[in-house]
Amino acid sequence: MKNPEQEQSKKNEILAGPPPSVLNLGYDLNLSVRIGSLIMPNPVGVASGTFGYGEEYDELVHIDALGALYTKAVTLEPREGNPPPRLVETPMGLINSIGLANPGVEKFLREKLPSLRTRLCPIIVNVAGSTEDDYIQVIERIEAHLASTDSGRPGIDGYEINVSCPNVQKGGMSFGIDPRLVERLTHSLRQKTSRPLIIKLSPNVTDIAEIARAAEAGGADAISCINTVVGMVIDTEKKKPAIAMGTGGLSGPAIRPIGVAATYKVGKAVRIPVIGLGGITNASDAIQYLLAGALAVQVGTALFSDPRAPLKVLDGIIEWMKRHSVHSVSDIRFMLR
Amino acid sequence: MRQFNATVAINRAIAPDWMHMAFEWPSDLPAPKPGQFFTALPPVVELRAGTILRRPFAFAGFEEAQIEKDSSMLSRPAYAHSIYQVRGPGTRALASMQPGSSLDIIAPLGNAFPYPERGERAIIAGGGIGIGPMLFLAEQLGAGTYASSAILVLGFRSALLIPFSGSFSAAGLPSWKKLLEKAFFSTDDGSAGTPGTVRDALEALWLQASDLKGSGTKNLAQKKWHLYGCGPGPMLASLAQFAAQNHMHAHFSAEQWMACGVGACHGCVLPAASGGFLRVCADGPVFDARTINWEANVQ
């Protein structure tokens, strides 16, 4: 019998090693970050919903070099998503209303997991649902599947719980605005998995710190902050909204200051790590999040202008660390003056 | 597919607000096929424009590299061609690029038009800026007169908007101009070709073909039609209806607002005829006309 914890720590040792580009620097840089029991080799991941399940970007991005791959949301049942148009570009931003289109957990395990298992970077599965039971069943199903496949990499190193999608009629968002629901949901999911549990929060709330504390109390290993900001564009000639659903989620550089402020607030409110995202396009953007209190970051919408953005961000962080004589990336969050 | 920095070779107007762009194609990258597209990142030229997304464009032509006879040296690189309409800040920024400048490209993306089946005649219909990929397809299929296999039917709002005419006659690829010489036209205002839509021009040709049936000469009716189309949503909805009524194969290249361009974000979908949605970038952009609910897409 294999001991899953031993397996995990052995894998973490491998993952914790510096990526190839850092080996020749002659510097003693520690880029790895710890989220619960997982050690990510570097702090730069790709955000859920912008990177599919990885395969789509295989020919364009050196995926193994990423700090983490956060998958497109997985729900219990398949979802077709919302009618088009689903996208509209705004000044330095993008509004989307995809509606969590995904193949559902069964098809995910059958068709998407095999390629995820071949990745060398940590894989975080983003989970969404309409009811508490939906979330529980997705994680139960995934854990049962992983327990029944005994060899090789699990292909799933943690979960990011989407309690903040603004684009589904029911659920998602309704969890994310109520601290009691967030705590209860986190607590329930905590019973189902020992893998890292990351709660992804919405900025569309009165006090994001309160929700973050609730997730921490429920047993979360980390907080992702932020999901998209509710937004709307109206076509003045057609006199109707630019996207079919009317409102959608705004992402991109337009929301970066909102995300940095939210990270700053949440970072002060909880002891668990914060993963910052929202409008990160270059290293300076990412370092703002790290200085605001984030341990790691995610790059999302910037992929749509340049698929190389995440690894450029990582290179820029390394360059900044050298210039500022910072040896461990996890120290940056304590450096804000 | 690959992301690369391409040198812009041509970027000039071919009609009011229409541009022809050509850029150098990497010698070790497979040539694009008609129907496929690329995305380009508009340069930041207007600070207040604030665009962040790449823009998708169909290929409108491709020129192979020329290799020196007695060496393996390239005497001329390969060029990819496209035509695009200046519609907003992104395309305005692209239109301002000078030959010699560098453009961030991801290509080739999406699927291509299938070839006509044995015994089929390709009828290639383009509307407005949608003529780009149709010129590329027509060139590959050898469009010309009735005697050759493919027929090109192009629709415009007015004769004034037909590319390479008037003051724009020096612009564009010679092969495109040859194709235009042999093409059938429709114009909304009746200033050239059949008055009305591309559908109207096709109906006229179809009627002609039916009249000629059984005459024994080499004519339109000898072969089953395979309709290829690209153009505005209402045009494709109308052509889908035409193809269904007359029991012909039809493949259309579709357009939708796009973010990633590689199938990851599910932003650029169209309603599928069987329910659900299909991604233009990864499931298309070329679809069998029967697989898309074109009517729902127009509403």
Image (cartoon, coloured by chain):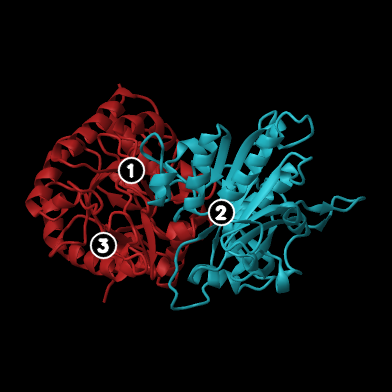
Chain colours: A red, B cyan
Q: What is the CA distance from the residue labelled 3 to the residue labelled 2?
A: 43 Å
Q: What is the CA distance from the residue labelled 1 to the residue labelled 3?
A: 19 Å
Label pair 1/3, CB-CB below 8 angstroms: no
Q: Secondary structure at mark 1?
A: loop
Q: Nearer the viewer, mark 1 or mark 2?
A: 2
Q: Position of residue B22 (x, y in %)?
A: 68, 62
Q: Position of residue A156 (x, y in %)?
A: 33, 37
In the image, what residue type sits under mark 3?
Val
Query: Which chain does the numbered disc 2 sit on?
Result: B
Determine which of the numbered discs, if any, sits on residue B197 in the image: 2
Q: Secondary structure at mark 2?
A: loop
Q: What is the CA distance from the residue labelled 1 to the residue labelled 2?
A: 36 Å
Circle 2 packing at 10 Å, graded few (<14), some (14-19), many (20+), is many
Confirm whether circles 3 and 2 share one chain. no
In the image, what residue type sits under mark 1?
Ala
Determine which of the numbered discs, if any, sits on residue A229 in the image: 3
In the image: residue A172, left or right of residue A97: left
Circle 3 packing at 10 Å, graded few (<14), some (14-19), many (20+), is many
Query: Which chain does the numbered disc 3 sit on?
Result: A
Q: Which residue is mark 1?
A: A101
Question: In this rendering, is residue B1 above or below A136?
Answer: below
Label pair 3/2, CB-CB below 8 angstroms: no
Q: Residue drawn at (33%, 33%), measured in percent from left and top?
A: A7
Question: In this rendering, is residue B260 above or below B205?
Answer: below
Confirm whether circles 1 and 3 share one chain. yes
In the image: residue B226, left or right of residue A79: right
Q: Residue drawn at (57%, 49%), measured in percent from left and top?
A: B200
In the image: residue A74, left or right of residue B157: left
Q: Position of residue B183 (x, y in %)?
A: 71, 52
Front-most of A76 and A90? A90
